[in-house]
Amino acid sequence: MQAPSTVGRITLDDVHFTYPGKEAAALNGISMTLTAGQKVAFVGLNGSGKSTCAKLLAGLYEPECGSVRWDGTDVREMDAQSLHRQVACVLQEPVRFPFSALSNITAATGTLTQADPARTLAAARASGADAVIASLPDTWETLLSKRFKGGQQLSGGQWAKIAVARGLYKNAPLLLLDEPTASMDPPSEHAFYEAVLRGRLREDQITVLISHRLASVVDCDTIYVFDEGRITESGSHEELMALEGGTYAAMFTLQAGGYRARSSAPLDKPLTPS
């Protein structure tokens, strides 16, 4: 069967998954319910299961046991290609197509020659790609590869903005953002999260953000903390910060402490032993 073009609820029920050749399970009994219009974050240490869970949500992997359901229908009953069309993925290492700037964005919908102008501009503005494109010699028509005469090579941060615009342009009911701003400078990262997490391009979309920078997830409706393939904590930023001895609160406090100004020694105090 074809995957639906809209989804109101995605449910994971006791999902288990182990990578081939591995003994330890990557996911071990994951259950959650995501609803349309919700902004969700997955946080935790490397290897805790965050990205694996996102790939099962998208139908890229199938659970060994348990189920992933879109509005009650198991994704294993859906045509895989139609399901993938309903998921927009923005990864830490973006695909760099040797196409024009415009085609790099519209490629998300499977076309290089047709574009919705209003949707394209909205996605470019939300990602910060509009400034990148405006700086190119032929703006939208500039080829993004040095293999072609007049082609331009973008920086890692610029490619990240193009990739984010591509994901937003797809306008899919499920948007997965896996460390999307890792190569962006701080102002660009801030502007992106302002647009995507505090703004919205589509109110019926489920947005899942995977990030190690916990300052970026504070505005998410629900934050899931992963540890060794399990969800150990879940709730809003405020709820998790209030948990006594909580993992999320400890990680957030540790990161926040790195931005506090270190106090300097008093002027009347010797800096070296006398």
Image (cartoon, rainbow, N blue to C red):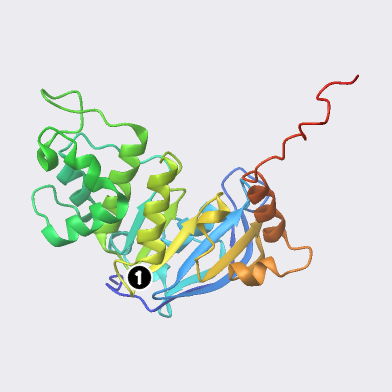
State the image coordinates of residue 87 (x, y, percent, origin top left): 34, 61
Query: What amino acid type should be assigned to the residue bearing mark 1?
Result: Gln
Instruction: Single out the residue that lies furthest toward the front.
Output: 268
Which of 198 and 152 lies nearest the eye of the viewer? 198
SS label for mark 1: loop
Q: Is residue 91 visible?
A: no
Residue 44 is left or right of residue 148, and the answer is: right
**Is residue 70 shown above or below 55?**
below
State the image coordinates of residue 56 (x, y, percent, origin top left): 48, 60
What's the residue at 32%, 59% (across, down)?
84
Quarter occupied by the N terminus = bottom left
Instruction: Single out the residue that lies furthest toward the right.
Output: 274
Report the residue marked by disc 1.
205
Residue 65 is left or right of residue 207, and the answer is: right
What's the residue at 16%, 45% (across, down)?
103
Residue 262 is left or right of residue 92, and the answer is: right
Q: Is residue 139 visible?
A: yes
What's the residue at 25%, 28% (across, down)?
153
State the image coordinates of residue 269 (x, y, percent, origin top left): 83, 30
Residue 256 is left or right of residue 126, and the answer is: right
Quarter occupied by the C terminus = top right
**Is residue 114 shown above or below 75?**
above
